[in-house]
């Protein structure tokens, strides 16, 4: 069976510099097993499937798969899927776009050349336990003295985040994925605009539970923003750079408006066509 298909690059206006996403359009008749098989075949960090919503207030529904399983929520698949839905002729019922996913209803807004999602509530927050922190230190090859702070920032995928002192400290990390196996660890530090990203306030890296570094991570940046802004360690609006070590130039725009933290960036279409599934 043929389905419309797009592959997009998220958190960048320049193709090949962000985080790629495969999106299958109109996948309502596609069995779960085929969705999982296609996501495994693309071997991208996530592949999504656009479906008709079941919640009356939602504009569309999305299912998000990694090569190994389904996620309730993820950031760059949210923005990339919304971009594809709009490009396919989607029209929101109201001013803001409402995405339905396993984590619930996610608000998305359009700001000129960017899409932004409202960060979902954290499912787990608070300090990282000593036993887990010991694994994180060993996996990042750091000592306790290198850490400014650490916090759970889990909004679905299971992220915890570690705050370091400088962007150089973040960029020079060489993680031991065997030690970190099963943990999703984000690392963040203030950027020095005279040395690293001249258009960013923070440098971020995301190390997945599957043993690879994610180029640009919306869910991680959302959790980090809620933590850092909420604790006064970041201003209510800033830009994060991610993907530098991988040769990417992801830019994540964060803004807190009232009680809502918005996380956004540009999305670029790279491939348009059809896929046989």
Image (cartoon, grey):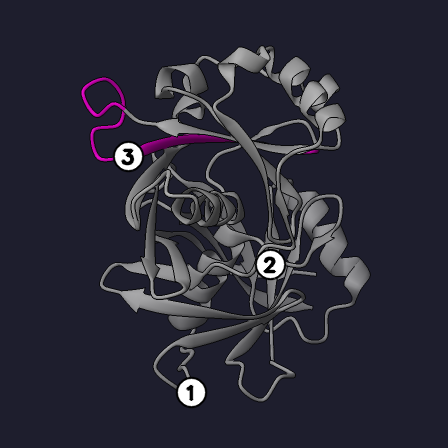
The residues colored magenta run 192-209
- Residue 194 lies, with reference to residue 62, above or below; the image says above
- View extreme (right): residue: 33
SS at mark 3 in the image: loop
Eye-nearest disc, 3 or 2: 3
The verdict on residue 177 being magenta is: no
- Residue 60 lies, with reference to residue 73, above or below; the image says below
SS at mark 1 in the image: loop
User: Which disc is residue 93 wearing?
Assistant: 1
User: Which disc is residue 201 wearing?
Assistant: 3
Q: CA distance from mark 1 to mark 2?
A: 22 Å
User: Which is nearer the N-term, disc 3 or disc 2?
Assistant: 2
* Residue 248 seen in the figure: no
Answer yes or no: do the residues labelled 3 and 2 have beta carbons within 8 Å? Answer: no
Eye-nearest disc, 1 or 2: 1
Q: CA distance from mark 1 to mark 3?
A: 35 Å
Quarter of the figure with residue 94: bottom left
């Amino acid at each position: 069976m043929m389905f419309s298909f797009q592959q997009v690059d998220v958190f960048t206006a320049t193709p090949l510099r962000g985080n790629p996403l495969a999106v299958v359009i109109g996948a309502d008749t596609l069995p779960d097993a085929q969705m999982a098989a296609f996501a495994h075949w693309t071997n991208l960090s996530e592949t999504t499937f656009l479906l008709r919503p079941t919640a009356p207030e939602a504009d569309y529904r999305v299912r998000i798969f990694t090569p190994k399983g389904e996620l309730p929520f993820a950031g760059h698949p949210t923005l990339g899927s919304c971009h594809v839905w709009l490009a396919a002729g989607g029209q929101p019922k109201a001013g803001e776009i409402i995405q339905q996913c396993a984590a619930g209803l996610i608000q998305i807004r359009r700001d000129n050349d960017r899409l932004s999602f409202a960060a979902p509530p954290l499912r787990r927050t608070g300090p990282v336990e000593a036993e887990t922190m010991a694994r994180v230190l060993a996996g990042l090859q750091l000592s306790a003295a290198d850490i400014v702070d650490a916090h759970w920032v889990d909004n679905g995928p299971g992220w915890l985040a570690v705050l370091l002192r400088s962007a150089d400290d973040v960029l020079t990390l060489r993680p031991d994925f065997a030690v970190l196996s099963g943990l999703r660890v984000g690392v963040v530090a203030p950027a020095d605009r005279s040395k690293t990203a001249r258009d960013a306030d923070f440098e971020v890296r995301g190390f997945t539970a599957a043993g690879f570094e994610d180029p640009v991570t919306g869910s991680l940046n959302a959790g980090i923003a809620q933590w850092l802004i909420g604790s006064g360690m970041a201003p209510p609006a800033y830009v994060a750079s991610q993907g530098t070590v991988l040769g990417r130039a992801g830019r994540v725009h964060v803004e807190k408006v009232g009680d809502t933290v918005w996380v956004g960036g540009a999305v670029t279409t790279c491939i348009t066509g059809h896929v046989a599934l």
